[in-house]
Amino acid sequence: MPGRIEDYALIGDLQTAALVGKDGSVDWLCLPRFDSPTCFAALLGGDDQGHWKLAPVGAVECTSRSYAGDSLVLETVWETPTGTVKVIDFMPQRDRTPDLIRIVEGVSGTVAMRGELRLRFDYGRVVPWMRRTDHHRVAVAGPDSVWLRGHPFVHSYGKDFATITEFTVNAGDRVPIVLSWLPSHRGTPPRQDPEKSLRETLEGWQEWVRTCAYDGPYRAAVIRSLITLKALTYEPTGGIVAAATAALPEQIGGERNWDYRFCWLRDSTMTLSALLAGGYHEEAAAWRAWLLRAIAGDPADLQTMYGVAGERRLPEIIADWLPGYEGSTPVRFGNAAVDQLQLDVYGEVIQTLYMAMQAGIPMERHVWGLMRTLMTFLADNWDKPDEGLWEVRGGRRHFVHSKVMCWVAFDRAVKMAEATRMPAPVDRWRELRDAIHIDVCAQGFDTELGSFTQYYGGKTMDAATLFIVKTGFLPPDDPRVIGTVEAVQEALDHGGFVRRYSTGTTGDAEVDGLEGEEGAFLACSFWLADALIAIGRRDEARVLFERVARISNDLGLISEEWDPRAKRQLGNTPQAFTHVALVNTAFLLDAVPEPHATPEES
C-alpha cells in the first residue's frame, strides 16, 4: 500500500516530478513531462502499478530525512543494527534526457542494500520488455525506454517482472544509480556524472534561493513554498502545474479524485503576486508570457486550464484498471472541467495583467488588443450563469465570486486604460463595472444572514466570497464585508480550518453534483487569514496562519486539503494553490498595515 499523502517528498527537474516515500520508494513519476503517463504509479494502488524502492534490507521506514539546505535534493538517513547509510535522491535540471539519480552514501558500519525497480508504463498498464546491455538494464515498451545504470559491483537480476539490485555499502562509500528516460526510437541516453550533477543541482538551488526577498518570521515556510512553486514550473514554457499528482482523493474512498497536472488560469493572480513579492520577476514574466500564449485566440474559447505548453485538449478518462489511492475511485486522468464556463477566469487574467504592469512588466500593444477582445466577450456574457471557481458538476448558477471577478476585470481594465492612455471604450467599461457592483450587492447579499452567499438566491456560504474584500470590491470596514467574513468563519469551520463551501449533509448537493464530503481546503484558510488582516483582526489571522502552516509535513510540503478528524493531508500534492496562498499571507502578516481606499460604488 502507498504511504499517507504527507509521507511523500518531492524531487524534480523543472519539467516533471517524482514522489519519494519514507520507505525509500519512488511511487509516482511521469516521464518526460508532468502530464505524461506514469512509469511509477504505486501511489494509486500498490507496487504492481510501478515503483522504485531503495533501502536497507529489511528496513520499513527511514530514521530521518530532510532536504539538503534550501534545495530539492532529498537526503534520507537509515540507521540499522550494522551501520548507517544516507540515500541522496534528486533530478538534475535536464540537458537532453530526464534523469533520476540515487546516491547511497555509507555513513558508518556496513549496510546491506536492496533495490526493487518495477517499471509500469502508461499509468500502470504496460509491463516493458527488459534486457541487459553493457552492464545496464534497458526497459522498452512502445514509445518509452528507461535505462538503469549503476556501479559495476551492484548486482542486479530479474524476478517477478521486477529488477532487483543488491549491494553492500561501507563507511565512506558512495554508490550511484541512475535512471534515465529516452524515446524508444532514439539511441543510448548520455551518461551522467552523478557527483557533478549533484554539485550543480545544489549550487543551482542555492543561487535561486538567494533572490528571495522575504526575511520575516516565517522564512523557512516561505522559502520551501517558493521552491515548491518553482519545482512545479515547466521551465521550457513558464507554465505552472497545480500539483505534481493526479487522482489523490479529497475524501478517502470517495469520488472527488481529479487530475491537477495542468495549468489553471485562476491561479495566475495569486501566483504572480507570490512570485513578485518573493523577488522572482523572471519567473513572473515567464508565467505571464505562458498565460498570453495560452489564451490567444477567440475569447469565447477561453478555458479554465491548459496543458503545460498551452495545449487545449485535456480529455478526461477513467483508469478503471487502477485500484486508486486507498481504494478511492474513479481514478481520473485529464480533466473535464476544461470545457466548463467559468467567468471568474476573465477577472483573474485581467488582474494578472494589471499586477504585471504595476510591477514594471510593460503592456505591449498586442497584449492590449488581446485584452480588449476579452473585455468585449465579457461585456456580453458577464450576466450568464457559470460553473464557477469550484468547477461544480451540478449545473450552472449565478455564483457571487464569478460576478465579483467580472467586476474586477472591468475595474482593472479601466485603471490600465487610464494609466496607459491606450485606446479603449473606458466609459462603457465604467458603466459595466458599476452595473455589476449593483447586481452583486442586490442579488448576492442576504440581509437575513448578514452576508454574501455562494450564489444568487442561495443560503449557503462559500469561502470565495472572501475575495469581496481581497479584490477591493467593498472596503474592509463595510458591515457587509465583516458579516461575510464572520459567516464564513462560522459556517465553514472544519476543526479550526476552512471548507471551501458546504458539502454533503451541510451543503447544497444539487450545486456540487457529487456524493460525499471533503476535507478543509487549505488555501481557503489562508484566504480567511487575509480577510481577518483586512478587517483589523491581525492576531486571529496569525493564529490561523500558524495553525495551517503546522500541518505541513516534515519537509514543509502541503497538499490541497486537510482532514482534521483523521489528522492527515488529502488531495493532490504538493498543491501550488496552497503554497502560493501561504506565501501571500506570510507577506501580509509581515507588512505594515495601510489604510484602505474605498472603491467606487454605484
Image: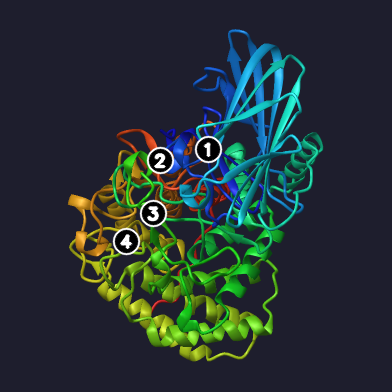
Q: Amino acid at mark 4?
A: Pro
Q: Position of residue 320 (x, y in %)?
A: 35, 52
Badge 2 or badge 4: first in the primary sequence:
2
Q: Amino acid at mark 2?
A: Gly
Secondary structure, mark 3, is: loop
Numbered disc in front, either 2 or 4: 2
Quadrant location of the N terminus?
top left
> CA gap, disc 4 to disc 3?
49 Å
Quadrant location of the C terminus?
bottom left
Q: Position of residue 10 (x, y in %)?
A: 57, 41
The residue carrying pointer 1 sits among few (fewer than 14), some (14 to 19) or many (20 or more) residues within 10 Å by Cα, namely many
Badge 4 or badge 3: first in the primary sequence:
3
Q: Is residue 236 above or below residue 370?
A: above
Circles 2 and 4, Cβ within 8 Å, touching? The answer is: no
Q: Quadrant of residue 338?
A: bottom left
Residue beneath disc 2: 45
> CA gap, disc 2 to disc 1?
11 Å
Badge 3 or badge 1: first in the primary sequence:
1
Secondary structure, mark 2, is: loop
The disc at residue 319 is: 3
The disc at residue 479 is: 4
Residue beneath disc 1: 51
Q: Quadrant of residue 153?
A: top right
Which residue is located at x 64 percent, y 50 percent? 145
Which residue is located at x 46 percent, y 65 percent? 471
Q: Is residue 250 above or below residue 61?
A: below
